[in-house]
Amino acid sequence: MDSALWALGRASGIVSLAMFTVTVLLGIVNRSGRPLPAVPRFSVALIHRNISLLATLFLLMHIGSLMLDSYAKLNLVDVFVPFLGSFKPFWQGLGTVAFDLLVAMVLTGLLRHRLGQRTFRAVHWFAYAMWPIALAHSIGNGTNGTERWFLALAAGSFVAVGGALAWRLSLNFLENAKTRQRSLS
Amino acid sequence: MSETLHINWTRCDGRGLCTELLPAVLGRDDWGYPVIRHPGNGDGTNAAIGPDDARAARDAVKLCPKLALSLQAWAEIQ
């Protein structure tokens, strides 16, 4: 039973990280206002939301199984307050920070219509902090974190998100950027 | 019961989700902004939504990235 919890804890962490990577990429596509091939804009928004919620479920599985596991023995304080863990407190604390940021993003995301766009957007910027923090946590704390296959996955994810971020910051990122810039001059 | 889709032009950024969900009601101009295809009384801000488009209109209100859309009962506008 114990080794099953331990395996589940590790696997669900890796799955949730991979899904958060996809979430960040879809979030950037969503912000650009562009559709994907055969995926209309409203679907990009829905897939972004649904994958992020699914990734959150895997993250809860990751945290829950390691709370029940007799080796990891996470307690409720470790889940919300970073850097107090008994094993690799720094690297585990990064995971806690990422989780706290995610909780804020999920809550404001689900309550977007009540809170208003400004609050939602300000909190949603946390994503750009959360993702690299979670990635660092997985490498520094993960049992498989420094194995070659995992580092290859991490490097691939980093390149993908970095590329998307470079596109995000480019002048023609928005779908109608060219048209609107031309109409100004 | 028919409803009215109200576009808040101060918030609208022309992202185009509503024009995808309501192609029969809304077109899109060169800058991406929605254009009401059949404006009643020349009103370019409130689009009449028939029963066939009610669900899509609700989705558009929910998904609008700028929270620029709202649905009102037709009577409120008249």
Image (cartoon, coloured by chain):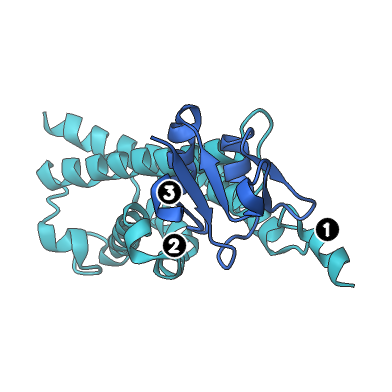
Chain colours: A cyan, B blue
**Where residue B49 sits in the image (x, y, percent)?**
50, 38
Q: Are marks 1 and 2 in contact (CB under 8 Å)?
A: no
What number is the disc on residue B71?
3
Q: Is residue A1 left or right of residue B57?
A: left
For disc 2, the marked residue is A124
Q: Are marks 1 and 2 on the same chain?
A: yes
Q: Position of residue B69 (x, y in %)?
A: 49, 53
Residue at 19% in and 58% down: A79
Q: In this view of the protein, which residue sits in the foreground, B78 or A103? A: B78
Q: Amino acid at mark 1?
A: Thr
Helix, strand or loop under label 2: helix
* Residue A93, position as x, y percentages in the image: 28, 64
Between marks 3 and 1 in the image, the one whose residue lies nearer the viewer: 3
| Distance CA(mark 1)–CA(mark 2) | 28 Å
Separation of residues labelled 2 and 3 (CA atoms):
26 Å
Q: Which mark is residue A179?
A: 1
Report which quarter residue A78 is drawn in.
bottom left
Describe the element under mark 1 as helix, strand or loop: helix
Regarding residue A23, the answer to whether it shows in the image is yes
Give the amino acid at mark 2: His
Which of the chains bears the disc numbered 2?
A: A
Instruction: Indicate which disc, 1 or 2, sits on the residue closer to the N terminus.
Output: 2
Return the residue nearer the eye: B16 or A3. Answer: B16
Labels 2, 3: front one: 3
Secondary structure of residue under mark 3: strand
Identify the residue at horizontal 58%, vertical 48% (top origin): A30
Q: Image point 43% across, 37% down: which residue?
A: B2
Residue A144 in sight here: no
Quadrant for the N terminus of chain B, please.
top left
Q: Amino acid at mark 3?
A: Leu
